[in-house]
Image: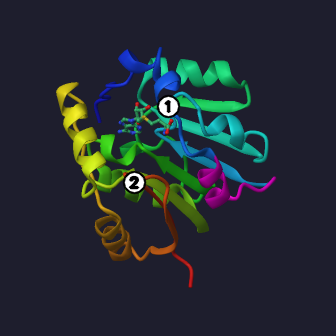
């Protein structure tokens, strides 16, 4: 799998422009002291810097050198690995929780990325996904903006994402809209 580092050019000013809905994200992750958590496509560590306060181990896997450098500067407790979601360099059943926030649509092969996230999750693990809803007006504008900057992506509505994960035997357990254009959902494969 070749790395596509589309984000290093934005790393310098990323945190000034992008502000994640951190309270919603943390509430849905619900980090516990024994948790091993993967922030897949975790970028500059906006979420991971909070996770390290609660979890036993916080890992970022991301293909962008400069985004990861920013994460390393935020906390030495964040374990960063240069890599792609489509081939996560961790063994099966390793993580208690996997977060994919604003990153799924940037993956070259998002379905492979989802399968990999499920592979590295423990059987009773939790998958938390935050995405842009391509049906919203703001989502459509953002999509256009990203295309202008040659950032290509595959955007799934909450219904499409739920259907894809249902076919992998993962069901939605929590859902909320975090802004007019973004949504956050949690998924699990236990009854
Ligand atoms: C919009 S940023 C989001 C960063 C972080 N999740 C956040 O919310 O602050 C998207 C991130 O996805 C990463 N990314 C792109 N393709 C990826 C892939 N195939 N696997 C994992 N991460 C990827 C980018 O390098 C970038 O850091």
Ligand 1 occupies quarter: top left
Q: Indicate whether residue 28 is drawn in magenta.
A: yes
Q: Which of the 4 quarters of the picture holds residue 2? A: top left
**In the picture, which quadrant includes the C terminus?**
bottom right
- Give the labeled residue for mark 2: 180
Query: Ligand 1 within 8 A of label 1's CB?
Result: yes
Q: Which residue is rendered at x = 34% and y = 65% of the image? A: 161
Q: Which residue is mark 1?
A: 43
Q: Residue at x 47, y 23 (%)?
A: 14
Nearest to viewer (mark 1 / mark 2): 2
Circle 1 residues within 10 Å: few <14, some 14–19, many ≥20: many
Secondary structure beneath label 2: loop
Using the rendered image of the protein, determine whether residue 166 is visible from the camera's viewpoint: yes
Q: Is residue 150 left or right of residue 40?
A: left
* Range covered by the magenta-colored residues: 23-33
Between residues 78 and 145, which one lies in front from this camera angle?
145
- Residue located 70% across and 59% down the image: 30
Residue at point 56%, 59% (across, down): 121
Q: Position of residue 95 (x, y in %)?
A: 62, 54
Magenta region, main secondary structure: helix
- Circle nearer the N terminus (1, 2): 1
In the picture, residue 125 is in which quadrant? Answer: bottom right
Q: Is residue 167 above or below residue 63?
A: below
Left or right position of 71 against 172: right
Q: Secondary structure at mark 1?
A: loop
The spot of residue 176 in percent (x, y) is 50, 64
- Pick whichever, 105 or 14, lies toward us: 14
Q: Horizontal placement of 138 versus 188: left or right? A: left
């Amino acid at each position: 799998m070749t790395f596509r580092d589309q984000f290093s050019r934005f790393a310098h000013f990323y945190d000034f422009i992008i502000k994640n809905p951190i309270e919603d994200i943390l509430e849905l992750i619900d980090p516990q002291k024994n948790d091993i958590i993967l922030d897949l496509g975790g970028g500059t560590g906006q979420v991971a810097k909070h996770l390290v306060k609660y979890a036993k181990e916080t890992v970022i896997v991301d293909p962008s050198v400069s985004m990861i450098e920013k994460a390393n500067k935020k906390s030495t407790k964040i374990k960063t690995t240069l890599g792609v979601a489509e081939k996560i360099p961790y063994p099966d059943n390793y993580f208690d929780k996997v977060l994919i926030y604003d990153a799924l649509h940037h993956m070259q092969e998002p379905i492979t990325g989802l399968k990999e996230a499920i592979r590295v999750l423990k059987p009773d693990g939790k998958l938390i996904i935050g995405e842009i809803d391509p049906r919203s007006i703001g989502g459509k504008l953002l999509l256009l903006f990203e295309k202008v900057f040659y950032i290509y992506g595959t955007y799934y509505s909450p219904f499409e994402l739920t259907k894809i994960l249902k076919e992998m035997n993962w069901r939605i357990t929590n859902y909320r809209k975090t802004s007019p254009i973004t949504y956050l959902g949690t998924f699990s494969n236990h009854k």
